[in-house]
Amino acid sequence: MSFKIFSGSSNLKFSRELSKKLSVKLSDIEINHFEDGEISVFVMEDVTNCDCVVIQSLSSNANNNLIEMVMISDALRRANARNIFAVVPYLGYMRQDRRCRVGEPISSKVITSIISSYFDRVFVLDLHVPQIEAYFDVPVLNLSCFSSFIEDIKNIKGFSNENFVVVSPDVGASKKARIYADELGCTLVIVEKIRRRANESEIVSVVGEVRNKSLIIIDDIIDTGGTICNVARLLSEKGAKCIYMYASHAVFSGNAVTNLSKNCINSVKFSNSILIDEFKIKDDKFGVIDVSDIFARELSSFF
């Protein structure tokens, strides 16, 4: 494969896994963060006429990670790289995909416009809403955790489509949950809730039967964990036997890990799109599913 891979500093572990899957060594780059917050980037290899891949998750400090990513791209462009591809396992700001009131920006459009200015093609994972693809001004491929999650679900001890149901934690996620339910041959249950403000919601109703069933809850993002914990408690009160949570992106803000640890959820599994401190999730309830192979398959078709 005739291309080079460069990693930003936000998720080096994912970058190493992806480079291993592609059998391509991570290229040398020097990244420094100064005391005043400025970032310095130096590409330490010859990239003349090379196709280059830059890997960076826009998580945690999304603003710094974004600037770091585009500065790497600019350094590569000025060093005469041919094409530059962005691999963004987690796209920050993707929940701010629309304007709810006058005076607000469409933040995800701002972020995608910046990325489009510096990269020739973008690979992302499980966008919050598919229409964000249209915000990019360059070709974008929105990959999915679907195959990895399905494989893991089928390996749950005692799994059967008669005893398990798939749960959508809100109406907005029902389309994605339906795809999982159809693949697994399970019934779909939908939780309807009203969001009062950011990270706060109220459950209105549960459509479907969960009594004496094991539940698979499918969502794209776990942030503070407050909403999903409320959903799990309600479903448990309604007679659910076991609850298994799957989320594409583990943001885990604030006390999310503590809240989830104390909740009635049996297991919480998520992709490695965001780097999580292993000490933070030492509880056996948590599990990370590697999705670097999903990106590796797609990248292999380009080089």
Image (tube, rainbow, N blue to C red):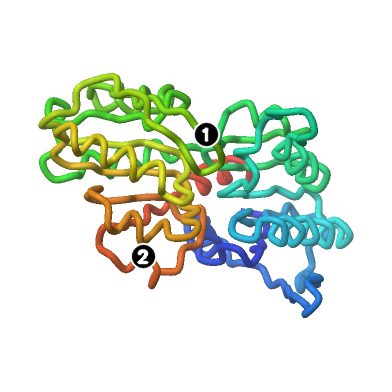
Q: Is residue 267 left or right of residue 44?
A: left
Amino acid residing under circle 2: Ile
Along the viewing direction, whichever of 56 and 103 lies nearer the viewer: 103
Q: Is residue 39 left or right of residue 197?
A: right
Number of callouts: 2
Q: Residue at x 63, y 26 (%)?
A: 131
The picture places residue 19, in percent across and down from the top left corner, at: 54, 60
Q: Which mark is residue 196?
A: 1
Rounded to the nearest whole Å, what is the CA distance between mark 2 and mark 1?
Answer: 29 Å
Along the viewing direction, whichever of 193 and 63 lies nearer the viewer: 193
The picture places residue 84, in percent across and down from the top left corner, at: 75, 50
Q: Is residue 133 above or below residue 244?
A: above
Q: Residue at x 57, y 30 (%)?
A: 129
Q: Residue at x 68, y 28 (%)?
A: 100
Disc nearer the start of the sequence (2/1): 1
Q: Which mark is residue 286?
A: none
Q: Is residue 126 above or below residue 44?
A: above
Instruction: Tell me the residue that label 2 is attached to.
Output: 281
Cβ atoms under marks 2 and 1 closer than 8 Å: no
Along the viewing direction, whichever of 197 and 259 lies nearer the viewer: 197
Q: Is residue 191 left or right of residue 197?
A: left
The picture places residue 69, in percent across and down from the top left corner, at: 73, 58
Q: Residue at x 47, y 25 (%)?
A: 172
